[in-house]
Structure formats: C-alpha cells, structure tokens
Image (tube, rainbow, N blue to C red):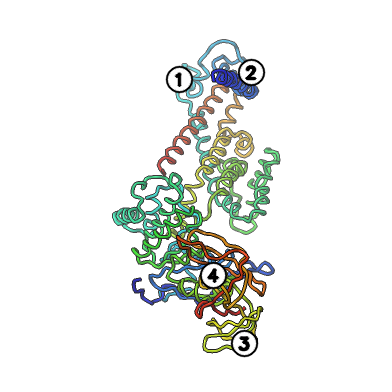
Amino acid sequence: MSSASEVADAAERKDVRGRWLLSLPALLIIGIASVFPLLIVLVYSFLKPGSYGDVVWQFSPDAWVGVLFQRDIFDGTLSIADAHLSIFWRSVRLSLMTTVLALILGFPTAYFIATRPERTRAIWLFLITIPFWTNLLIRTFAIQEVIRNEGVVNGLLMKLGVISSPIQMMFTDFAIMIGMVYVYFPLMVLPLYASMEKLDFRLVEAGYDLYATRLKVLWRIIIPMVKPGIIAGSILVFIPSLGAYVTPRVLGGGRNLMLGNLIELQFGQGRNWPLGAALSITLLVIVMAALLIYVRKASNGGAHHG
Amino acid sequence: MPEKPDRSAIEIRNVSKIFGSGDDQVKALDNVSVDIRENEFFTLLGPSGCGKTTLLRLIAGFDFPTEGEIRLHGEDIAPLPPFKRPVNTVFQNYALFPHMTVAQNIAFGLEMLGRPKQEIEARVAAMLKLVKMEQLRNRKTSQISGGQQQRVALARALAPQPKVLLLDEPLSALDYKLRKEMQIELKRLQGETGITFIFVTHDQEEALTMSDRIAVMSAGRILQVGSPWEIYDHPAERFVADFIGETNFLTGTVKEAGNGRARLLLGSGAEIAASAASDFKPNAEATLMVRPEHAKLVKGKGDLGGTVQNIVYFGTDTHIHVRLDGGEMFIVRQQNARSAGCGFEEGEKVGVSIGDDAAQVLRD
C-alpha cells in the first residue's frame, strides 16, 4: 500500500515538473514579447527627452505631468492641456460610435448569415473576410476615393441633383468613423456569427408560440442569448479603434488627431519619447478600464438573468 | 368517462402542405381533413415522416398550409402568425429559455400578453403547483432534470390558458418509468384544465393509453380516426392494424361478401368468415387480420391447423408461434396462470380456433 502511494507521489511530482517545462515556451514568449517591452515603455515615461529624439537617462515626472497639463512658456504655470483632453475625448467618442455603428450593422449581417443554409454560410463568411486580406493603407485610400469631394458619393449625388455642391466628408470625424467601421466590421461580425450559429432557433419558435412579437423575440430571447458574441465583438472593435493610427491619419487629415496619432507625433516630429511613452500607457489604462467595466457589467448581467 | 361536448375545437379542412419546389417537392400533407373536439385528448399517431408533426406545426402557426383551412372554434386561423393564435405548444426538446428561471419561463407568455403583474404572479404560482414544481421556481432550467424540464414546459404552455395545447412527442426524451408517470400526469392535467390536447407520437402504446381519439397517419394522409378501441379492434386498413399492436395477417380470396361480413378462402384451403372493414367483391384479394390474444390454441382440429414452433414466456402471458399448414407463421397469445404452464409443447400438432368476433377482413 505505502509503496504504491509513494510511486503515485513521485509520479505526481514528476507530473508537476513536466507541466512547468511544458509551459516554459509560453512563459518565455509572454515575458519577451509582452512584459519586457511594456517595462521599457514604463521606464522611458519617467526619463527626460533627448534633443534629437531618444531619451536622456535622468529621472523626471515631466512626461506624466505633460499628459494632462501644459506649462506656460513664459511664467511656467501649469494649466490643463486642452489639446490632449480633446484628443482623448475624441478617441473615446469616435471609438464608441464606431462600436455602436458596427454593432447595428453587424447584428443583422451576422443574423442573415447564421440563418442561411449551411453550405452557403461559408461563402458569406468568406465575403465578409475578403477585405481583411488587403493592405489596410490601400483600403483606407479606397474609402478616401469614395467620400472625397470629387469622389463617388458626391459625384453621384450631384449628378442626381440632390446636392449642388459637394458635401465635405473627408477630414471630418465622420470620415474617421466610417473608415474604422469599415476596417473593423469583420471583427464584429465573426464573434456575433459564432454565437448566433449556436442559437437554438426552436427557442425563437417557442417565443412566437408564447405570444411574443418579432421585436419582443429579438429583445427577450435572441439578444440575451447572443450576448457573449455582442460583448466579444464590441471589445474587438472598440480596442483597436481607440488606438487606431492609419485611418484617422488618412481620413481625418492632420486636424482630427486620435490617440494613436498623438503618440506617433511624440516619437516623430515632437521628439518627446517620454511623453509618447506616458501617453501609450495612458491608452493602455483606458483600454483596461473599459474592459474591466465591460466584463464586470457582463458578468453582473449574467447573474441577474439567473 | 365524463361526457365530452361534441363541439369542434379545431377543424382541419382539405389541408395540403408541400415543401420545396420543382423536383425537390415533398408533399408532407395530402388533402387532410379532421375535426378535433373540444376538451378532447386527441392523438396524431404515425411513423416518422408521416406528416403528424407538420400538421401540428400548421396548427401552431410555424408553417402555413399550401392549401386548405384550419379553423379554431369556427374561425380560420391558417393565415395568422403563431403569436396571434390562442394555441400553445410543448416542444419535443422542451425549448425552455436557458437564460431565464423556471418561474420566468412560465411567466413569459403571460407577460407577452400584457397581463397585470399580480395576475401573472398568481398564475405562475398556480401553474407551479399544478405541475408540482413550487420548490424549484428560482432554478435555472439547466439545473433541473429532464422530467422536471418537461413539467416546466407543460406549465409554460398551459399558463396563458390556451384554447388548444399542442404536444410534439413530449415524452420521447424520458426514460421508460418517467414516461409512464408523465402519461398519467398528462391525462390528469388535461382533465383538470379542460383544455383540448393534441398529442403527437409514434408510440402506439402511448396513444392507446392516453387518447380519447386517435388519428392514424401515414405518408401525409389520415388513414383512420377513432377511439383507441375502434383503432385497435376495427382497423380500417392493413397499415393501421400493422402499426398498432401485434397482428397476424393471412391473405386469401373473398368467397362471398355482404352485410359488413366476408367469407375468405385462405391459401391453406381453410375458409373463415369475419367482419369486413369495407365492401368486397367475390374473388377479390383480401387480408384476414387476427390479434394474437383473440385466437385460441386447441388440441386437435381448429379453424386452422399447424405445428407449435416456438414458445416465448413473457411473464404476464405466453406467445406461442405456430407454423400453419399453409406455411405462414401465426402467433397466439395466452394469459398465464400461476399453477400451470401453457399446456403445449414445441413440435406439437395443434389447431388454431378463431372465434366469430376475433377476425376482420381488410383491404390489401
């Protein structure tokens, strides 16, 4: 008996060591690719900027002060950095609007695909993902071609006589939002589709049978059941939108900056790496906070429903 | 049995349903007409693919008939969407809402009807009591057993007090013992609520034990409508006799017919007279049907001669397989007594006696 348990103990110890060894590659990759670079960013944010980019190895909280405040060049007093705040606010606002619009468009799209016969579903999904295989920059310029003053939309509307002069769409927040919805649309549709595909449509029939109208069935049965897909899709669209760089750069011009552009500016023309690093971490914190709120709300909602 | 009013709850008039189009067309229902009476336990019985579930879905409103009318208390409901029909369904897999509790599931229909909160609460409590599930009202539907889910599905469908309750093979997922329990339970609920039940099943035993009347379906048509007794003892067609219970079939030619009776000449040369389900002309091919428990085995000469081939003991009764002189197999069922065996031995020459009322002549 005792020898048997000893053997079992030894096997278990070996098992534990084996598990550690097996997880080592993953731990190494996480360490090198995620933790280490983040540490560099964090350290840089507490240093002084060099005159030609790079950093001077000297501790300074200036970059962190600069995230929210600006120093008057004459008397050195601090005031709120309106420019930064408005960029934060624009980033969050545009990302939220992008997420909502992508959800409004993506939900019926995913529902449509999920209710097709099984053999045609793959084709629809394929069509949704095709734009993803094209270079982001090219796709963004393609949108520019559609919405610029001499572009397809304005040209068509003017030809039809709906408008007499082109509507200014380029270099507006609207353009950025349209661009981001277009770019991140598949990230909304795919998780939505994944949860709708699992939806038991007999439950929908049961809803109709119990006097629920189409709208009530949507609200009381379909949406609660595909909620995981809604949450996943929204997170997948909101987070990259918040840090988007190419889309606001091309479609928003130089005037409508988002957080990604502001950060790029510090590492480029601004030659203020510590501020760029501090802004990057700020973005990270905003994303984490948004995620945390979402997850908490989602799990609360789940508990509420039973 | 209490007297049932004879008014129709549901009238199905010349209903056909065709699925698909062109070469893929499938005729699921072929000109079906039937009346289902108020406060009746009515069963649609048939093998899978016979159209019974399609007919149920047409009544519920999930599908619409290609042709024909469906009347509920005289009003044509065929064009109405399901949420406008005072009809509720118990689904085969229950289709309970997994994101709601037991009580929320039961309240759903009433909420959708816009009933006041107090009424809903009272009704949910009454329903929970009716199906004996008061203890589990706040459980999620995934946390209760199959039999309990069945009860919740019943309570949910009964809560809005529908005119007609549709049940789509609701007991098929339960094990044997639970199924027996639920059969009695369903019968009790039907009696207590006074609601017309339309029950779909492929299980003939279930149909016989629960129903007031049964419609036997095959290949999109209704072959016979009648009480369990009529269906079992006076089947209209060979398919009905074959589908319900065990039956001996012997083929032969009609010698003479008339007055609801026919005399049949069997292959072995024996002649047997029996009641006839339809009119026959002399020399027509016909089938003689004898239930195993209606025939008697005798020592010596009976109506048919044969040899005992197999004796199968079933506890309550014994099945004796007889090879008839004409070559066909014939099964006789004898009720067992405690003191003695069945009285026959394998290989013994015996006679099969078919009483005057034991057999029926059927169309082929």
Can you tell which mark lies on residue A78? 1
Quadrant of the frame with the N terminus of chain B: bottom left
* Eye-nearest disc, 2 or 4: 4
Q: Which residue is mark 3?
A: B255
Q: CA distance from mark 2 to mark 4?
A: 101 Å
Give the residue at x 65% y 57%.
A159
Q: Earlier in the sequence, mark 2 or mark 1?
A: 2
- Gap in angstroms between the C-alphas marked 2 and 1: 24 Å
**What amino acid is found at the position of numbered circle 3 in the picture?**
Lys
Do tags 2 and 4 sit on the same chain? no
List x then y, in percent, for residue A37.
Answer: 61, 21
* Badge 2: residue crowd in 10 Å (few <14, some 14–19, many ≥20): some
The image quadrant that residue B112 belongs to is bottom left
Could you tell me how many numbered marks the image carries? 4
Chain letter for the residue marked with disc 2 in the picture: A
Q: Nearer the viewer, residue B42 or A174?
A: B42
> Of the residues shown, which amino acid type is indicated by label 2?
Gly
Disc 2 marks which residue?
A53
Amino acid at the residue labelled 4: Pro
Q: Is residue B270 above or below residue B99?
A: below
Q: Earlier in the sequence, mark 4 or mark 3?
A: 3
Q: Label 4 is found on which chain of the structure?
A: B
* Badge 1: residue crowd in 10 Å (few <14, some 14–19, many ≥20): some
Chain to which mark 1 belongs: A
Numbered disc 1: secondary structure: strand
Is disc 4 in contact with disc 3, using a CB cutoff of under 8 Å? no
**Residue hosting label 4:** B292
Residue count near mark 3 (Cα–Cα under 10 Å), binned few <14, some 14–19, many ≥20: some
The reply to whether residue B54 is visible in this rendering is yes
Residues behind callouts 1 and 4 on a single chain? no
